[in-house]
């Protein structure tokens, strides 16, 4: 079945450092891929998305490229801020992209120190 | 415009008891999905409701059941609670047949089973 694997955390960085959080997936067909962020005490928020191969999703300085050949969707940011401290989840939705069912990775905690 | 709301915020139950969690979708949404997020894990899809019927179900036992009301709000019921049911339960709302990424998550209900 479909699954998502992301790098284990926590990831601890200094402010302005470069961030990479790895995510790989297993899926039949061509899923849509997402990154969600969860701040303490809040629900999940969609950070960015890519719905087909080679698409690049971007938002708030974060980027991720849908790589079908390596089944990956790594999250990157050139310069992290303390306010980026949160838990980040990679997720996929099935081929049709509108079933409402998301499959999540286990999450990666990011801590950014001043 | 209120987003997705869930109640209660926290609750503590004893093994063997039953619990009901509630979710009000974002205004204009007609579909509700429920997820279980165990500590340190990503959310897992439980089931989805629209038109007052369960439409999709994840790999959860029959102890987990739900209901959707005519106003689109939803309940999640868990019978015969086990210690392993301790988790954050997330509700997400969306419009039927819209892309999966167009769903909004509530802040969750933290259930502790002792």
Image (spheres, coloured by chain):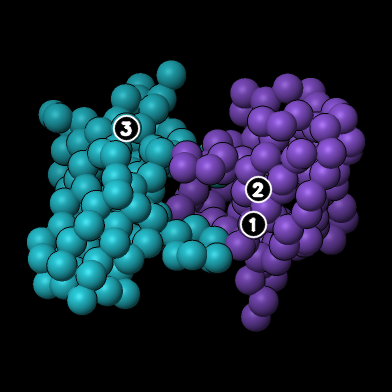
Which label belongs to residue A5? Answer: 3
Tell which chain the image draws in purple. Answer: B
Reading the image, the residue beneath label 1 is: B108
- Residue A63 seen by the camera: no
Compared with B42, A78 (above or below) is: below
Mark 1 closeness class: few <14, some 14–19, many ≥20 residues within 10 Å: many
Please state the chain letter of the residue tagged with numbered disc 2 in the rendered image.
B
Foreground of the two, A107 or A98: A107
Who's the residue at 45% across and 53% down the image?
A: B101
Which numbered disc, 2 or 1, marks the residue that appears first in the sequence?
Answer: 2
The image quarter in which residue A112 lies = bottom left
What chain does mark 1 sit on?
Answer: B
Q: Is residue B55 left or right of residue A98?
A: right
Report x, y in % for residue B3: 63, 71
Q: Is residue A57 left or right of residue B101?
A: left
Q: Chain of mark 3?
A: A
Q: Colour of chain A?
A: cyan
The quarter in which the N terminus of chain B is drawn is bottom right
Q: Are marks 3 and 2 on the same chain?
A: no
């Amino acid at each position: 079945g479909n699954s998502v694997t992301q790098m284990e955390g926590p990831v601890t960085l200094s402010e302005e450092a470069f961030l990479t959080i790895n995510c790989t997936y297993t899926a039949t067909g061509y899923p849509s891929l997402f990154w969600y962020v969860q701040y303490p005490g809040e629900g999940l928020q969609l950070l960015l998305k890519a719905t087909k191969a080679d698409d690049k999703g971007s938002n708030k300085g974060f980027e991720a490229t849908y790589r079908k050949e390596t089944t990956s969707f790594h999250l990157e940011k050139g310069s992290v801020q303390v306010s980026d401290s949160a838990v980040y989840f990679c997720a996929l939705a099935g081929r049709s992209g509108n079933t409402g069912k998301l499959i999540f990775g286990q999450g990666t905690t990011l801590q950014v120190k001043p | 415009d209120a987003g997705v709301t869930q109640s209660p915020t926290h609750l503590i139950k004893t093994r063997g008891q039953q619990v009901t969690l509630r979710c009000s979708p974002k205004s204009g949404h007609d579909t509700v999905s429920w997820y279980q997020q165990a500590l340190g894990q990503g959310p897992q899809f439980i089931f989805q409701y629209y038109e007052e019927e369960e439409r999709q179900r994840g790999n959860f036992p029959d102890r987990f059941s739900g209901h959707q009301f005519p106003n689109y709000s939803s309940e999640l019921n868990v019978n015969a609670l086990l210690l392993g049911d301790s988790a954050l339960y997330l509700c997400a709302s969306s419009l039927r047949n819209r892309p999966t990424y167009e769903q909004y998550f509530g802040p969750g209900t933290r259930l502790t089973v002792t």
